[in-house]
Amino acid sequence: MPTQRERADRLAIVLARARRRRWPVMPLGKRGEVLLLLGIAWILIGIGAAIVPPPAEDLLFLHIPVPIRAALWCGTGLVAIGYAWMPRVRSDGWGFVALYLMPAVRAVSYFIAWVDFTADGRSGYRYGWLSALFYTVFIGIVVVCAGWREPPPLLLIEEPTKVPEVEPPPLLSEEPTEEGDEE
């Protein structure tokens, strides 16, 4: 496990190399990493929404045309990726809001389709409860990660300067000194 000093040295080296290349680097925090990874996942789901047929026909989200559905997934993923590099001070909260939207639409849609199936057994989607739980877990991940505090950035810590050693003052001894021997 590297020490804080070793991590700080590595970060300083990476930033120095980036400055030499004139490549702007802003390291992602934990929240930014989550935004980046889930943003990429949302873009992949958007591509899948465009090219993979849906599992059932009685789903509410299917009333949204395929190109719009795919664009919404990809768009919210791009918003999340864009906010991944935002400093926490400026708030990356909108990135997490974007990640929340599309899974919520799917979870509600699948849940309603399952309720519809259980009501009459003919229409709806028999496995809607499972898909609704799947997308609800995604929502839970987004909510939990949105509540994380970003750890403070690594600071370059300089070696402590050595303090010159000073002899401690003499302690009072129990024996009287020569000056105090007058009896």
Image (cartoon, helix red, strand yellow):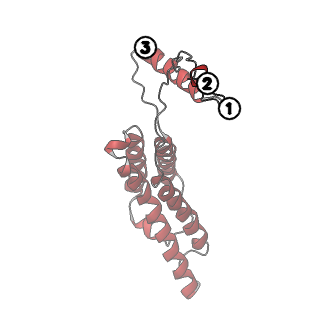
Badge 3: residue crowd in 10 Å (few <14, some 14–19, many ≥20)? few
CA–CA distance in space, label 2 to label 1: 62 Å
Quarter in which the C terminus is drawn? top right
**CA separation in Å, label 2 and label 3:** 79 Å
Q: Note whether 162 is above or below 102 in the view shown.
A: above
Q: Secondary structure at mark 1?
A: loop
Query: Which secondary structure lies at badge 3?
Result: helix
Q: Residues within 10 Å of mark 1 (few under 14, many from 20)?
A: few
Q: Which residue is mark 2?
A: 181
Q: Compared to 6, does 142 lie above or below?
A: below
Query: Where does label 1 land, which residue?
Result: 1
The mark lying in front, picked from 2 and 3, is: 2
Identify the amino acid type marked 2.
Asp
Viewer-nearest of discs 1 and 3? 1
Q: Amino acid at mark 1?
A: Met
Secondary structure under tag 2 reads loop
Sequence order check: which comes first, mark 1 or mark 3? Answer: 1
Quarter of the figure that contains the N terminus: top right
Residue 139, percent from left and from top:
50, 61
Residue at mark 3: 21
Residue farthest to the bottom, as pictured:
120
- Mark positioned earlier in the residue sequence (2 or 1): 1
Q: Position of residue 132 (x, y in %)?
A: 55, 68
